[in-house]
Image: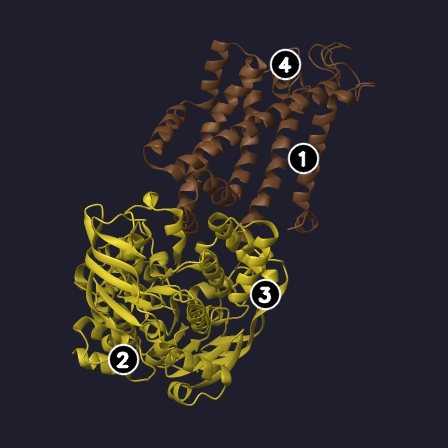
Amino acid sequence: MLLQIENLRIDGTDVDGNSVEIVKNVSLEVDRGQVLGLIGESGAGKSTIGLAALGYVRPGCHFAGGSVRLDGQELVGAPVGQLLDIRGRRVAYVAQSAAAAFNPAHRLLDQICEVHRRHGLGPRAAAERFAVELFGKLGLPDPERFGQRYPHQVSGGQLQRAMTVMALITKPDLVVFDEPTTALDVTTQIEVLAAMRRAIREQGAAALYVTHDLAVVAQMADRILVLRHGAAVELGETRQILEQPREDYTKALVSVRRGEHERHGGHERSVVLAVDRVDAAYGAQQVLFDVSLRVERAATVAVVGESGSGKSTLARVITGLLPPRSGQVRFGGEVLSNDLAGRSKEQRRRLQLIYQMPDVAVNPRQTVQEIIGRPLTFYLGMRGDALRRRVKDLLARIELPAHFADRFPGELSGGQKQRISIARALAAEPELIICDEVTSALDPLVADEILNLLLRLQEESGLSYLFITHDLATVRAIAHEVVVMQRGRVVDSGAKDEVMAPPFHDYTGKLIRSVPEMRTDWLDEVLAGRA
Amino acid sequence: MTAALLLRRMPWITRLGLLLVLLFAFLAAFGPWLAPYPEAEPVADVWQPIGTAGFPLGTDTLGRDMLSRLLFGAQRSIGLALVITVLSFAVGSVCGFLAAIAGGWADQVASRIVDVFMSFPALILALLVLSVMGSSLPVLVLTLAFIDGTRVFRLARAVAVDLNVMEFVEAARLRGEGIWWIARKEILPNALPMLLAEFGVRFCFSFLLISALSFLGLGIQPPAADWGGMVKDNAQAIAFGLPAPLLPAGCIALLTISVNLVVDFLLDQASRRSRRG
């Protein structure tokens, strides 16, 4: 057995200095040529276990028990010199953000060959030849010269593949992938997944693949270990986990990813927001070309497209942060001023925005009471007891207990913070809320709850949503209408059932086929279809 | 976070620093009343060694009681440094925030003016102003506060520029909040840890700058006691193997170190809190 982890326990300390168990008695085995998927929500301990395979724990944590053996050699408590020899040479690590892992000041090839050199594995020329070979295998353009580029000169997907090359350059026995495709958009993700899978198979290496996305791990792993709160929930063959999950938690994970929500009620047919033939640019670079769309009262319009398609720019134009070059935005019958300063308080109140990252969308130094209370005071002039009562009502509507009013955002989870953002938007009693990727930073189960909350609020108060997303499962779940964008243009639009069902528009079809499905052989089929 | 909890988390070295800071604060507040002798009168022979009966810390170059002068000097040196630092932060951070939030030409104008003043070394600029305007207390305070204020402006602006692009600030802007509200409610609370750390450092710097100016004869004028001036007055004692100038120098060093111990801890706590969640 190549990697054998037995009854591993890792403890850490929280902010208040209390000891917490991060990994509780987890055992697993991986042999050569195998890929084991570690899956769970954030806080499940999956990254911690991945790092433990390198005999490493994050600062503030320590091994509390159990063993990690690589080819029979114990890593827990091994001397640092011994671990340094193993890390990078026998066990390699591919991190989530390649952009953060590469030094922007050095060429890719220099950084990739550094591991090879530091472990004294032979002449640099040999390493360079092997790197070029790997560049080719991973489908990177112009392999001979790719390494001469700097990190900022290649795309995110290419950088992630370059990092895989960095991991494989020493021909390691085991590669730990820590959410390596989370930062990529769906079309890029496929290519990276395929390239990584091919590379580890050809090298005969074993891999631990850490992710929160079941559909992704289904393409990569032979077996899956489901983790929750640091403990193992279920271990099984990939097919069994997907098709016959035994544990309730695994079943919940699987059904959320399959994404089935119910569609509710009818709605009136008056137009709340109309965007007419908008062109917009950042400086000389035009980002939006002739974009038009309509949002009806109590309806949800989803704007989909991969990153760079201009969907967030569209939100900036509608909110007035980026004055369009031509075209206009009409809201509730009035033409909105192009720039923010020209809009009335009332116009601003009726149009609210919820952001992607709840961590930066709410001020970490204000209490929940202040965050939700401010729009109430600002727009509606509420103060004192009335204000406090209203904040309590709003907290109840977003399903948080009243005592949360005194908390700071740092004391809330990601999902709770996103609820606070929603409450802040709701406080203004808007007619339209623009949701900019509001679920993409959240765990799947939490994202699901947030979507349900948004749906319920729409039913209760006839809100309209303009939902910007790259996640088609979300679109299926909540949209009435869909607008598909590509490179700043609307390429397809209409009722959801028409847009999302065959026959597809070319680009829509490509997007839909790029979403990993929960079948083990999906990736092979897609690649076969493309060839 | 309660003060008790904060105290419980302090490592012993921080507690020591805090204790010393409180002690210095106490001496600064009540020094003149505690001093056994007057500030400016010779009361014994010159350069009596430490431990002389009646003069526990000895006497200085004119035969004045060292302990008394240290106590008078504490009030003047610490008090002045505090006033200067508070002034420079009040003006510097407000201007820095507003420049960052307003952006555009207002920011350009303010930043370039500050650049001009930053291009002079602080000591040279202070010497220039003080020798032209004459060294009086108000001139000294305002000059040093202004010089320090330009440094604070740079920091406050840099921090605020980073915060200004955060989405919660954008949300406030979209809501229609004014620039003053954004500076006070959205930016300031988040910039506070950074400013606090800088406050500790700046306090020490302005303290040292006053000492340096006094040492050069342009700061606090004799016979008034201040620690920097006392180092200068007694500098020659070193040549005779007497530790007299080391006493005020030691006070300066000790105060600087203890303030920084406390600031380090507070900074660490602040960064921990924002890392949470």
Asked if the residue under mark 2 is in contact with the one under mark 3, i.e. CB atoms within 8 Å, the reply is no
Q: CA distance from mark 3 to mark 1?
A: 43 Å
Q: Does A104 sit left or right of A458 as displayed?
A: left
Q: Quadrant of residue A524?
A: bottom left
Tags 4 and 3 on a common chain: no
Amino acid type of the residue that numbered disc 2 sits on in the rendered structure: Leu
- Residue count near mark 3 (Cα–Cα under 10 Å), binned few <14, some 14–19, many ≥20: few
Q: CA distance from mark 1 to mark 2?
A: 65 Å
Q: Chain of mark 1?
A: B
Q: CA distance from mark 4 to mark 2?
A: 83 Å
Q: Which chain is brown?
A: B
Q: Chain of mark 3?
A: A
Instruction: Kindly state the secondary structure of the residue where label 1 is placed.
Output: helix
Q: CA distance from mark 3 to mark 2?
A: 44 Å
Residue A419 is situated, as x and y percent measured from the top left of the image, at 48, 63
Q: Chain of mark 2?
A: A
Residue pointed to by mark 4: B233
Amino acid type of the residue that numbered disc 1 sits on in the rendered structure: Val
Residue B269 is situated, as x and y percent measured from the top left of the image, at 58, 49
Amino acid type of the residue that numbered disc 4 sits on in the rendered structure: Asp
